[in-house]
């Protein structure tokens, strides 16, 4: 199984400041035939289901504000919120879909400082 | 707008079988473009993929649960279902149904989710 490790477990950021969530896969999730990383990011607010933010590591889902961005360096993936808003308070999860079993990171809780 | 809704018993006794159904509305379940999956989340914990099914009936299961899981599809009712046998307290979780936006062997992100239903295993 591919293990997804997120860090930190939680972080507190001031409104308007940058928030960075990290996710590392235990092996590459880059599919050589199409040069795509099989990695998604989700946002989950209390009492709600996860909401898809990014797929292919950095392709923003329709309707997601552009203050959110996704990036990759090898097996290290980053979700960045460039200017944290109150409505961004949530738990963020990464998920690999390179192979089954599909696996998620443990989640990173983002709060307001 | 596609909508998914989970239904089924909220309380299941240990050693019995958990059964949930997901009803899809606002779109077709009988499409070769999507997989339909189940994900669960124990209270206060992270997400775990249970398994997924294609319109043809092809299934993929998490090996950690495979011996106890069955996912099936009823296209006439626009429903897919989850059965998890021999449950214990460790199976207490919010169970979500969700759509996967790919036909590639369940290797896809989840783009639409149900609201989830908390199933408690207790005598």
Image (spheres, coloured by chain):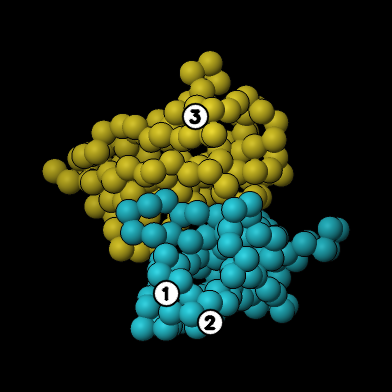
Which colour is chain B painted? yellow
Q: What label does residue A18 carry, if any?
A: 2
Q: Residue at x 61, y 38 (%)?
A: B35
Q: Residue at x 71, y 79 (%)?
A: A73
Q: Position of residue B99 (x, y in %)?
A: 56, 41
Residue B21 is at least partly visible in this image = yes
Of pointers 1 and 2, the one earlier in the residue sequence: 2
Tell me the distance, in whole angstroms, between the alpha carbons under discs 1 and 3: 32 Å
Mark 3 Cα shell of 10 Å, populated few (<14), some (14-19), many (≥20): many
Within the image, what quadrant is residue B101 found in?
A: top right
Dots 1 and 3 on the same chain = no
Q: Which residue is mark 3?
A: B24
Q: Which mark is nearer the camera, 1 or 2?
A: 2
Within the image, what quadrant is residue B69 found in?
A: top left
Q: Are marks 3 and 2 in contact (CB under 8 Å)?
A: no
Q: Position of residue B75 (x, y in %)?
A: 55, 21
Per the image, label 3 sits on a secondary structure element best described as strand
Q: Which mark is nearer the camera, 1 or 3?
A: 1
Closer to us: B16 or A84? A84
Most distant residue in the left direction: B123
Which colour is chain A painted? cyan
Report the side of A93 relative to B59 (left or right): left
Q: Which chain's residue wears label 2? A: A
Closer to us: A24 or B123? A24
Dots 3 and 2 on the same chain = no
Dots 1 and 2 on the same chain = yes
Mark 1 Cα shell of 10 Å, populated few (<14), some (14-19), many (≥20): many
Rendered position, A92 above or below B87: below
Q: Which residue is mark 1?
A: A110
């Amino acid at each position: 199984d591919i293990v997804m490790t997120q860090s930190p477990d939680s972080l507190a950021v001031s409104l308007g400041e940058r928030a960075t969530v990290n996710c590392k896969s235990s092996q590459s999730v880059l599919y050589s035939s199409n040069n795509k990383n099989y990695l998604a990011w989700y946002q989950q607010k209390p009492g709600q289901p996860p909401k898809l933010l990014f797929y292919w590591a950095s392709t923003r889902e329709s309707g997601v504000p552009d203050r959110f961005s996704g990036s990759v360096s090898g097996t290290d993936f980053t979700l960045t919120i460039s200017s944290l808003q109150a409505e961004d308070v949530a738990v963020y999860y990464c998920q690999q879909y390179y192979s089954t079993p599909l696996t998620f990171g443990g989640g990173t809780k983002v709060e307001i400082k | 707008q596609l909508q998914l809704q989970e239904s089924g018993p909220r309380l299941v006794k240990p050693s019995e079988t958990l059964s949930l159904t997901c009803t899809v509305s606002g779109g077709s379940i009988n499409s070769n473009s999507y997989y339909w999956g189940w994900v669960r989340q124990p209270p206060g914990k992270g997400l775990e993929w249970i398994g997924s099914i294609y319109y043809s009936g092809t299934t993929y299961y998490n090996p950690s649960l495979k011996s106890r899981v069955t996912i099936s599809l009823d296209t006439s009712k626009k429903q897919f279902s989850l059965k998890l046998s021999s449950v214990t307290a460790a199976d207490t979780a919010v169970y979500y149904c969700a759509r996967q936006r790919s036909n590639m062997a369940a290797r896809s992100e989840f783009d639409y989710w149900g609201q989830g239903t908390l199933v408690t295993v207790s005598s």
